[in-house]
Image: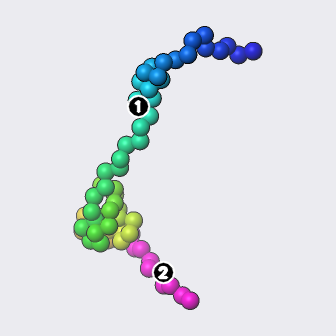
Amino acid sequence: MPPHPKRKLSKGRRDRRRAHDALSVKNLVLCSNCGSMRLPHAVCPNCGHYQGREIIEIKKEKKSK
């Protein structure tokens, strides 16, 4: 049989262990070309621009009925 804890961990000790488990908010900036939110120092996934230049070509999909 595996070993079991002899005493219950207190809520404070449990919560101190979990203090570093929180998710952090991503830092988003506005794209200077299209105005959508993107990660800093990265190509905009919406328009493909970075520092005022088009880095990747984004194809626009047409809606068909």
Image side of residue 23 versus residue 1, left or right: left
Q: Is residue 36 visible?
A: yes
The x, y position of residue 19, in whole percent, is 40, 29
Q: Residue at x 55, y 16 (%)?
A: 8
Of helix, strand and loop, which one carries label 1? helix
Of helix, strand and loop, which one carries label 2? loop
Quickly name the residue at label 1. Answer: 20
Q: Residue at x 44, y 77 (%)?
A: 59
| Amino acid type of the residue tagged 1 in the rendering | His
Instruction: Relative to 47, say whether 21 is above or below.
Output: above
Q: Residue at x 60, y 10 (%)?
A: 6
**Front position among marks 2 and 1:** 1
The x, y position of residue 41, in whole percent, is 30, 55
Q: Quadrant of residue 37?
A: bottom left
**Would you call the spot at circle 1 few (<14 residues within 10 Å), some (14-19), or many (20 or more)?**
few
Examine the structure image and report whether residue 42 is included in the region drawn in magenta. Answer: no
Check residue 61 in the rendering and tell me which mark sits there, or answer none: 2
Instruction: Relative to 27, say whether 31 is above or below.
Output: below
Instruction: Relative to 7, say whether 46 is above or below.
Output: below
Examine the structure image and report whether residue 62 is included in the region drawn in magenta. Answer: yes
**Magenta region:** 55-65
Q: Is residue 55 visible?
A: no
The x, y position of residue 21, in whole percent, is 44, 34
Q: Residue at x 45, y 29 (%)?
A: 18
The x, y position of residue 34, in whole percent, is 29, 72
| Amino acid type of the residue tagged 2 in the rendering | Glu
